[in-house]
Image (cartoon, helix red, strand yellow):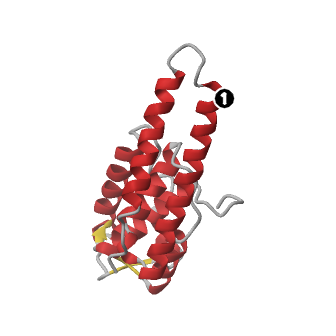
Amino acid sequence: MYRDKTLIPTEALRLCMLGTLAIQPHTYAELAREVRAFASRIVGPSLDVMGLSIEVLRAEGLVQPVAAQPDPADETLELTDAGREELRALMISNLRSPVDGNSQLIFALKLRFLHLLSDSDAQDQVERMREISETEHARLVDLKQRYGAEPGQFDAWLDLELTQVEDRLDWLATVKPAG
């Protein structure tokens, strides 16, 4: 984790793997494909999405095979109790404004797996997303006030960004825990 207790890219992938297994057991190959597909659709195909090996999760005792197979690649993996604890720890981590690809990935993962948290933890995450979005909104308003009158397209771009943040804030106000 970064100093501000937000997730680094490999932890975002770890969250994706654990959350995917929390929903449904997968084989090694299925899990790798699912994580690669989801992450690349959020941050683009250039991300080295398998920087974290599934074998690390197994070695740390976070996942285990449902039933042993002669070829470990054929084993269907599921979360252990330790894996569920790690998933929760990753889910309740701090958030950063979704400006870069990693932050967008973490926002998306938290929303995708929000239903796996208790109502209290889920509501806390939604509130953090609102706070981050409000901070981003204030930053953009400040930029508009300081530089919006300059010639060029910067003011129009700021209007676009402000609309997106305002829409996100409106939407987050409607999100309720599903637990």
- Report x, y in % for residue 129: 50, 60
Say which quarter of the image contains residue 164. top left
Residue 23, above or below 81 = above
Instruction: Answer with left or right where residue 7 lies relative to residue 62.
Output: right
Residue drawn where x is 45% and y is 86% of the image = 81
The residue wearing badge 1 is: 146
Left or right position of 79 against 138: left
Residue 65 visible (yes or no): yes
Image position of 45 with respect to 109: above or below: above
14 and 94: which one is in front? Answer: 94
Judge whether 112 appears above or below 145 on screen.
below
Direction right: furthest residue: 3
| Three-letter code for the amino acid on which mark 1 is drawn | Arg
Identity of the residue furthest to the bottom in this view:
81
Instruction: Please tell me which residue is depicted at 69% across the width and 60% down the height of the picture.
Output: 4
- Nearer the observer, 177 or 40: 177
Residue 170 placement (x, y as % from top left): 39, 55
Where does residue 33 sit, x and y in percent of width and height? 31, 54
